[in-house]
Image: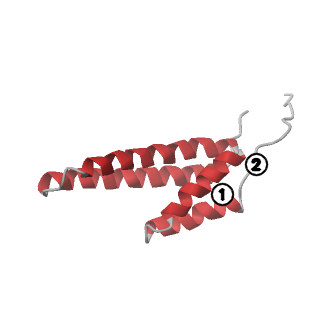
């Protein structure tokens, strides 16, 4: 039986990615009604990259490795400026990625049924 670690942190990363997707959809719909400059295409690409990185963090924190912990902390620090929702989710994610981190086991014990 495979037991993934850091399920709550993974779920929080997925929630942030879904919120960013919702904001992207709003921005695309708003673009049809307002005259937005052409350089907004770069911001769309940046948002797609942000969504990809959050989904990648959600997948990698389940392994419990140190590099995924640093990646999660790095992404979370930038979310703290997104007041109010990003700040609340960012504080929760920092709490789970620093104080409640479930490490990858050094030795795996075989399970005999």
Identify the mark nearer the N-term, 2 or 1: 1
- Left or right: residue 109 compared with residue 18: right
- List the residue tagged with mark 1: 97
Q: Quadrant of residue 35?
A: bottom left
Residue positioned 45% across, 50% down in the render: 17
Outermost residue, bottom side? 84
Q: Position of residue 97 (x, y in %)?
A: 66, 57
Q: Quadrant of the C terminus?
A: top right
- In the picture, measured across the screen, residue 95 lies left or right of residue 75, that is right
Q: Which mark is residue 55?
A: none
Mark 2 Cα-neighbour bin, 10 Å: few <14, some 14–19, many ≥20: some
Residue at the (57%, 67%) spot, across then down = 91
Q: Is residue 46 above or below residue 92?
A: above
Name the colour scheme.
secondary structure
Rendered location of residue 52, percent (x, y) = 46, 43
Tell me the quadrant of the picture where the N terminus can be found: top right
Horizontal side of 21 relative to 68 (left or right) equals left
* Label 1 crowd (10 A; few <14 / some 14-19 / many >=20): many
Task: Give the image location of residue 112, x and y in percent.
Answer: 86, 28
Is residue 58 or residue 37 the one in the foreground? 37
Q: Residue at the location (20% across, 52% down)? A: 29
Q: Secondary structure at mark 1?
A: helix
Q: Are marks 2 and 1 in contact (CB under 8 Å)?
A: no
* Residue in view at x 26 percent, y 54 percent: 27
- Residue bearing the label numbered 2: 103
| Cα gap from disc 2 to disc 1, whole angstroms | 10 Å
Work out whether residue 57 or residue 2 is closer to the camera in this orientation and state it.
57
Label 2 residue SS: loop
Q: Quick one: 95 or 79, which is closer to the camera?
A: 79
């Amino acid at each position: 039986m495979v037991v993934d670690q850091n399920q709550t942190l993974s779920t929080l990363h997925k929630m942030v990615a879904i919120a960013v997707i919702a904001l992207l959809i709003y921005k695309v719909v708003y673009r049809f009604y307002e005259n937005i400059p052409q350089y907004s295409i770069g911001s769309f690409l940046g948002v797609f990259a942000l969504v990809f990185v959050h989904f990648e963090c959600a997948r990698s924190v389940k392994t419990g490795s140190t590099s995924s912990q640093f990646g999660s902390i790095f992404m979370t620090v930038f979310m703290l400026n997104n007041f109010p929702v990003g700040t609340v989710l960012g504080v929760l994610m920092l709490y789970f990625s620093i104080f409640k981190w479930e490490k990858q086991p050094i030795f795996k014990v075989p399970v005999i049924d």
